[in-house]
Amino acid sequence: MTNDAQLVPVVAYARISADLAKDGHGVDDQHKVNDETASALGLKIVHYYTDNDLSAAKAGLVRPDFEAMLRTLKVGHLPDGQPVRGAIVVADDRLVRRVGDYERFVDALTYEDGRVYADAKGLKDLYNEDVESMGLFGVVIAKAEVRKIKRRTRRSHRRRAEEGIPVGGKRPFGWQDDKLTLQPEEAPHLAQAARDVIARKSLHSILAAWREQGVRTVHGNEWQSRSLKLALWNPRLCGWRKHNGELVRDASGVPVVGKWEAIITPKEWMAIDALFSTRIGPNVKADGTVTDYRTPSHLLTGILRCGKPKDDGQICNAPLRVSTRPDLSGGYVYQCQSRSMGGCGGSARNGAKVDEYVTEAVLAKLEERTAAKSQVSSEWTGQEELDRLMVKQRKMLQAWQEDQVSDELFFPENHKMESRIKELRKERTQHALQVQRASVVTENIREQWYSGKLDMAQKRALVREALHAVIVLPVGGGGRRPFNPDLLVPKWTES
């Protein structure tokens, strides 16, 4: 029997899956196999390198132990000085699956003469060019196999999406473990949240209510703004599905309906999609209006602007903030910030009186707009053009595939049609949002406002829908003056 001191010291690389790594058995069994294999070949493993559950095939993924092994092989010893004269792996496809990594491994191992390398089939001479070439060939085959697996996976996902079949993984909130049947306690929360968002209620307000009710995610965690937004933005809620960021559609361009039960209607989801898609910043939407994620306690915070002229003739324009004034009716004032905070400190108004006046002005404006919009058909007028373009696009595609249309004609025309179809779909989504909003809030808006059915976030959203800002002009003359609504100049948005 070979003396242990006569065995060649080598390092071993053993990479196993996450499932095996969770219990110690997978690691222990892997080490045992390597030890027995090494001893039979006259080798002694002096250190193990493992990158469990880190794929060798993923580009850009760093495997820390693999990199450490390369450094050890190049210098010929471990950090503690233990000599290393080679490496062993049970399966070479667990070592590398990319040509570049294989070349780096060979360069490190053969940095000095006399190094050894072994896998499950025995010792291999990596100093031999033919052996190295075979190793490279094996890496290429392994890489090609990885690509085939990825392509099969993508095709499988696409097929399942087109057939409306749920994907694997954890069940989504709102559905039971079969991912098809609604969960009776969770689904109503999502349905109500969706309608609240359409009705301009902030995510912050919805989350606060959910926390009071003890609503938790499927993992038992508290909901956060991002997770709630993603849940509401998921077309699964209305029975549709996205694949690679796009709605899955049939040959006619109609979204494919999944086999699971829907929680809301497609029109409601399209309204949510339009709402979230137009946001371009933390609280600014593409149309310039502002959405409050952290709702202020007062109606016109940030909406009132100081109109006092500065020395250069320009108005201050700083937003007015709320200050407590127990001596006034209502107990608060809207006041321009101090110079150190960017304002002039020269304007202040009774908060309760300003809120009352602006509220009535906004309600009157919204009622006026609602009356005008009620004369307009709820049907979107662009559907005929969209249908015509989609038919034309399919016919041109078929003609191109049958070589009846040249590439020079097909690609520019098809691109124009795709762009216009995308525009029309966006317009349809925006129209759905407007119709849905009108049906949810603007009917009987005055009754809803004063009955307490609207929270502060919804009221502020309605104010911002009607107003860009309200300029507060200076009273003049010094001292306290009676409240004068003529010194409040509303800047209305376009209807």
Image (cartoon, rainbow, N blue to C red):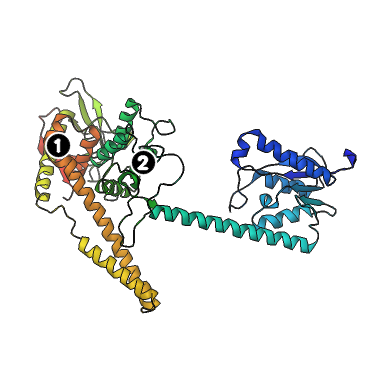
Reading the image, the residue beneath label 2 is 231
Image quarter of residue 230: top left
Q: Is residue 162 visible?
A: yes
- Horizontally, residue 341 falls left or right of residue 364, namely right
For label 1, the SS is helix
* Residue 343 appears in the rendering: no
Q: Residues within 10 Å of mark 1 (few under 14, many from 20)?
A: many
> In which image quadrant can residue 15 be found?
top right
Rendered image quadrant of residue 331 = top left
Q: Amino acid at mark 1?
A: Val
- Image point (23%, 31%), residue name: 298
Q: As drawn, is 450 to the left or to the right of 39?
A: left
Mark count: 2
Q: Quadrant of the N terminus?
A: top right
Asked whether 50 or 357 is in front, the reply is 50
213 left or right, relative to 58: left
Does 383 appear above or below 115? Answer: below
How far across and how far down the image is residue 402, in percent? Answer: 38, 76
Query: Where does residue 413 sit, x and y in percent of width and height?
Result: 33, 72
Residue situated in front as seen by the camera: 163 or 131? 163
Amino acid at the residue labelled 2: Ala
Report the residue at 72% width, 59% height from top. 135
First along the sequence among labels 2 and 1? 2
Q: Which residue is mark 1?
A: 358
Q: Position of residue 330 (x, y in %)?
A: 17, 24
Element class at badge 2:
helix
Residue 370 vs 190, above or below: the answer is below
Q: Nearer the viewer, residue 397 or 475?
A: 397
Above or below: residue 393 compared with residue 125: below
Viewer-nearest of discs 2 and 1: 2
Residue 370 circle label: none
Left of 112 or right of it: where is 133? left
